Image (cartoon, grey):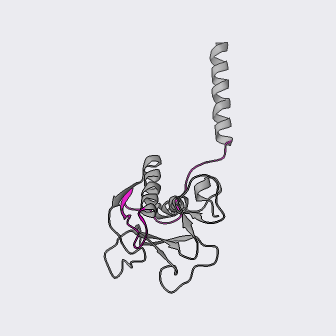
Amino acid sequence: MIARAGTKAVLCLVVVCAALLPARAFQLDSPAWPQPGIDFHVVIPDQSDVFNAAFVEAIDRWNDSSAFTFTKISDSADPCNDPNDNPAINGVGFAALACGDEPFDETTLAITQSWSSSRRIQSGIVFNTAFTWGVYSGPRQQSSVDMRRVAVHELGHAIGLGHTTAVSIMQPN
């Protein structure tokens, strides 16, 4: 009897301690996709194969570590396509403007533009051409911004995730 009571006490303590730990989960920031995956056009117009490969690696990181699946389409699509005027299509690109005539602010590396009604129907990612971009591992370099890391962050927004300090890749800066 004592062993059983001791086991219950330990189990109770474990449950209480687990409940006190901070939550480490993603939360959706906007309407969800109707299914847990989308097609994403991964060829970035007018960019080298290095950037295209980095974007594909960023997609692979989400595919390998989440229940959401990006199906890679090997062509380009306008990330600022308006699905009210054309069929919905998810794409990526570099531009000096953030989808239209609106300039990026001086600290914005990239944006994810999403369209939704009751469900998300399209997302596009635009990298700001005002920055010097590279693809590298290790600590941040002063001379360029790692496109792959920013792509992982922006793809999180494409899924529907918002900024959080609980998960490093989705921190606001």
Taking depth in this image into account, of 2 and 74 the one nearest to the observer is: 74
168 on left or right of 67: right
Q: Which residues are magenta?
A: 21-49
Q: Give the percent coordinates (x, y) of residue 119.
A: 41, 67
- The C terminus sits in image quarter: bottom right
Q: Give the percent coordinates (x, y) of residue 90.
A: 38, 68
For residue 52, what is the image quadrant?
bottom left
- The N terminus sits in image quarter: top right
166 on left or right of 85: right
Number of marks in the rendered image: 0
For residue 16, what is the image quadrant?
top right
Magenta segment, principal secondary structure? loop
75 on left or right of 56: left
Quick check: 170 above or below 12? below
Q: Residue at x 55, y 58 (%)?
A: 149
Confirm whether the magenta stretch covers residue 22. Answer: yes
Taking depth in this image into account, of 26 and 135 the one nearest to the observer is: 135
For residue 14, what is the image quadrant?
top right
Quick check: 130 above or below 67? below
Confirm whether the magenta stretch covers residue 38. Answer: yes
Quick check: 34 above or below 105? above
160 on left or right of 106: left
Q: Give the percent coordinates (x, y) of residue 153.
A: 54, 60
